[in-house]
Image (cartoon, helix red, strand yellow):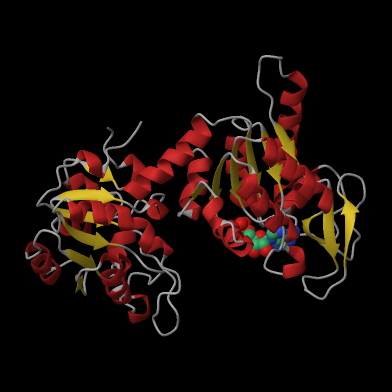
Amino acid sequence: MPKLSIRDLDIEGKRVFVRVDFNVPLSGSGEITDDTRIRQTLPTLEYALGRGACLILASHLGRPKGKPNPKMSLAPVAIHLEKLLNRPVAFASDCIGPAAEKLSADLRNGEVLLLENLRFHPEEEANDAEFSRQLARLGELYVNDAFGSAHRAHASTVGMTRFFPQAASGFLMEKELNYLTKATSNPERPFVALLGGAKVSDKIEVIENLLPIVDALLIGGAMAYTFLRAQGLATGKSLVEEDKIDLARKVLAQAQAQEAHAQEKVRKYRLQLPVDHLIAEKLDAEAPTRVVDGTSTPIPEDSLGVDIGPRTIALYASEIARAKTVLWNGPMGVFEIKPFAQGTLAIAQALATFGGTSVVGGGDSIAALAAAGVSDRITHICTGGGASLEFLAGEKLPGIEALTDK
Ligand code: AMP
């Protein structure tokens, strides 16, 4: 069900409370080291200001655990936002209370107020009703543009929506939902998903939910070794989740069963594991490496898999080249160590050139796109890692459920 958009609200001259995701990385001296999250909200903010609204912006930053912590203050963000918006941004040193209420009430059309870190109050994460009410007092309309926090039922994402007749999505929220919904409900086919990273346990729900939707699910990263063990292969010192081997076996059996029984008219899906691996004796850039076959050769006891091998790279790249929609989350190897990064970088390159719709999520995959210099050639980069994984796992996100249906 599509959600109400800021476009559907009559915002002229109104005080619009916008939940944004300004959870940016700060250096030791309080400088913003990456302002992507702030920039991604600018279309919403500029739209509202252009229509004569005034804005009350609220966000969390870091994990201050319910106590004020100057290292996690949003004050530097207010200064940075002034430059990006090219207008003054007032700052309320507490997100609730008489001072914030006065600053909000005094706002004139086109003016902006940023509130201090919501998580300086434990009531934010507790989704406390009174705290929600106090936040809601600051605005006349409510907009949520913080997709990255949509999987959390907090006061600013869920609690305070009860105090407004309508709750609308901002443009960033809308964009994230459009791409993820399209990919999972009506993708242009072939639809290929690539999942990597460290743990099966983090992504098992995503695997189970995506399998019946995709044409092929390609597995990489350490996750692959739990699956290989489930197939009875020796994996040496590779990262394996012993307590997830049974689950991996079940998923493999399901995938095989449907491949065997699929009628001609029923779409088949495939679960593809790496066909070769790059192995090393330790996680060290200087460690000698070699390639072993992934389907028959055991990984020696003294070695661990650190990346997908060249045959797997070629296979996955050809799957991507044939696809019309590709979803990617999680690195193919220990890409932080340069000699083990080739698989992940090759996937980034393949995504940049295949010509279909590419949707990428997860901090590591996004970093790999940047390292490969191809970020601008990706159709959509998800801003919320955790939120996008929960969405892909088929879960309902409370911050989205709380928005008004269109
Ligand atoms: P995740 O947070 O689950 O997406 O996992 C990301 C981490 O997985 C990265 O830090 C990678 O270094 C790690 N990773 C990927 N492949 C492997 C591997 N073969 N062995 C150990 N760690 C890996």
Taking the image as shown, residue 150 lies to the left or right of residue 343, namely left
Q: Give the percent coordinates (x, y) of residue 108.
A: 8, 62
Q: Quadrant of ligand 1?
A: bottom right
Q: Is residue 391 left or right of residue 42?
A: right
* Camera-nearest residue between 217 and 358: 358
Q: Nearer the viewer, residue 2 or 160?
A: 2
The spot of residue 9 in percent (x, y) is: 18, 41
* Furthest-bottom residue in this view: 29
Is residue 77 toward the left or the right of residue 364 in the image?
Answer: left
Check the picture and name the quadrant holding the N terminus. Answer: top left
Q: Nearer the viewer, residue 241 or 45?
A: 45
Is residue 334 shown above or below 64? above
Identified at 74% across, 60% down, the residue is 342
Which picture quadrant has residue 241?
A: bottom right
Instruction: Where is residue 250? Give x, y as percent.
Output: 72, 36
* The C terminus sits in image quarter: top left
Q: How many marks?
A: 0
126 over 275 or under it: above or below: below
Residue at 65 percent across and 35 percent down: it is 323
Q: Is residue 324 visible?
A: yes
Residue 207 pos. (x, y %): 62, 40
- The answer to whether any part of residue 361 appears in the image is no
